[in-house]
Image (cartoon, helix red, strand yellow):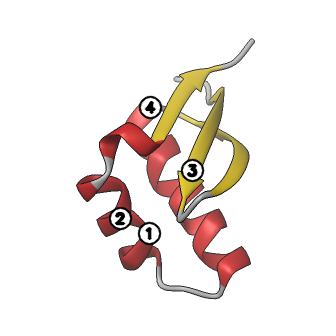
Amino acid sequence: MAQKLPWVGTFNINNEKKEVGVKAYSRAQAELLMARKIAWKDKKSPAVIMGYLKSHPESYEIKQSK
């Protein structure tokens, strides 16, 4: 059975830096979970955050942590 891996993301959304960590099976799942966390904290829809990330790919970085 596959195991979830730790991921860390650094985001610059509207000139506000955010660092988010999650455990996920893949980078794509980690990106979605991070977008949900950011959306919940900012009281926005996850679709709004995902749309922003899609149109600004240079504004964030997601890496597998150790």
The single residue placed furthest to the left in the displayed view is: 55
In 3D space, how far apart are the residues under numbered discs 1 and 2 (Cα atoms)? 5 Å
Residue 52, labelled with which disc?
A: 2
- Residue 19 rendering spot, x and y as whole percentages: 72, 44
Which residue lies under the disc numbered 1? 49
Seen as rendered, the residue at the extreme front is: 15
Q: Residue at x 48, y 40 (%)?
A: 60
Closer to us: mark 1 or mark 4? 1
Disc on res. 12: 3
Q: Which tag, 2 or 3, sits closer to the chain's start?
A: 3
Residue at the image point whose x is 50% and y is 32% from the top: 61
Q: Amino acid at mark 3?
A: Asn
Residue type at numbered disc 2: Tyr
Report whether 54 appears left or right of 60. Answer: left
Do the residues bearing badges 1 and 2 touch, measured as CB atoms within 8 Å? yes
Place of residue 34 in the rendered image (x, y in percent of width and height, measured from the top left): 58, 53
Q: Earlier in the sequence, mark 1 or mark 3?
A: 3
Q: Amino acid at mark 1?
A: Ile
Mark number displayed over residue 62: none
Location of mark 4 (residue): 26
Of 58 and 43, the residue lying toward us: 58
Name which quarter of the figure residue 66 lies in: top right
